[in-house]
Image (cartoon, rainbow, N blue to C red):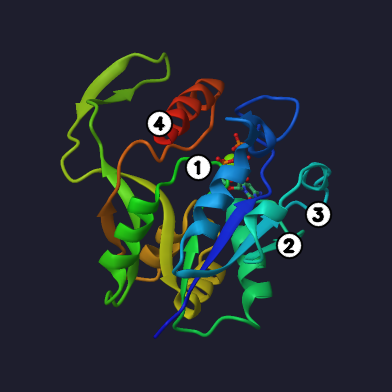
Amino acid sequence: MPRHYAIVPAAGSGARFGAEMPKQYLPLAGKPLIYHTLSALCRCERIDRVWVVLSPDDVWWRTHDWAPLGSKLETLFCGGETRAESVINGLAVAETAVAADDWVLVHDAARPCLSQVMLAALCDALADDPVGGLLAVPVADTLKRADAAQRAVATEPRDGLWQAQTPQMFRYGLLLQALTGHRGVTDEAGAIEAAGLKPRLVRGDTSNLKVTYPADLCLAELILQGKKR
Ligand code: CTP
Ligand code: MG
């Protein structure tokens, strides 16, 4: 049986958020944001190990206690210039532990509200899939095309459009090959598509949001509070 591993890219600076520290370390429901992200993955019984990929210049990680997350967690200070580079660097270190047909789940540090239900749904849906796939949600809003003056010039059809989330789950060998061959992509599925394959879209929900702007952090707080109740 193939095993499941997780890689968490966490080497970004959070420029759009604009805080005085990278957004993954901002306080959220009493813990650093990334604690919730890692906790969701470490708690999942089918995941054997979780590698978190930090910036080589990270000064924040050591200021917190991660011991409660247990022994599955391994810290790598090998983040790169882009998210894709951070993931590739993490995959390279993981090579000694992972077989080519093992599953790797890549999950953004900035998505702290991942539920066990969605994680299980992703693993179940892809268990026998030849390609792999990702959590995603169908686009709900009407889409506008803007001109240079930020005026709407057209309404775009949203049929067949989905918003990609993470985790994105692919076989180790295929993922490493696709990412190293297509470095300009913004997510793993993009690299797999560029390699000519079609990742499966597994329907998730909008609670698995990515914290990008300050308002997202307030929403994440509400979602996590709601889960506790
Ligand atoms: N990431 C990474 N290495 C990079 C850039 C991003 O590991 N060089 C990680 C981030 O830490 C985050 C995830 O990729 O967990 C998704 O990226 P994003 O939300 O864009 O985070 P940032 O790049 O930190 O934010 P921004 O783009 O606003 O600077
Ligand atoms: Mg970014």
Label disc, if present, on residue 56 of the rendered structure = 3
Q: Secondary structure at mark 1?
A: loop
Q: Does ligand 1 reach within 8 Å of label 1's beta carbon?
A: yes
Q: Position of residue 83 (x, y in %)?
A: 60, 52
User: At 51% across and 41% down in the image, what residue appears?
Assistant: 112
Above or below, 91 against 69 in this view is below
> For residue 124, which quarter of the picture?
bottom left
Mark 4 is surrounded, within 10 Å at the Cα level, by few (under 14), some (14 to 19) or many (20 or more) other residues, namely: few
What residue is shown at x 46% (from left), y 40% (from top)? Answer: 113
Q: Of the numbered discs in the image, which one, if any, rests on residue 111?
A: 1
Distance in Å between CA atoms under marks 1 and 2 = 19 Å
Reading the image, the residue beneath label 4 is 229
Please name whichever residue, 145 or 14, is drawn nearer the observer in this view of the structure. Answer: 14
**Kind of residue indicated by mark 3:** Pro
Could you tell which of marks 3 and 4 lies nearer the N-terminus?
3
Residue 155 seen in render? yes
* Mark 1: few/some/many CA within 10 Å (<14, 14-19, 20+): many
Q: Amino acid at mark 4?
A: Arg
Which comes before the other along the chain, label 1 or label 2?
2
Q: Earlier in the sequence, mark 1 or mark 4?
A: 1
| Residue in view at x 57 percent, y 30 percent | 29
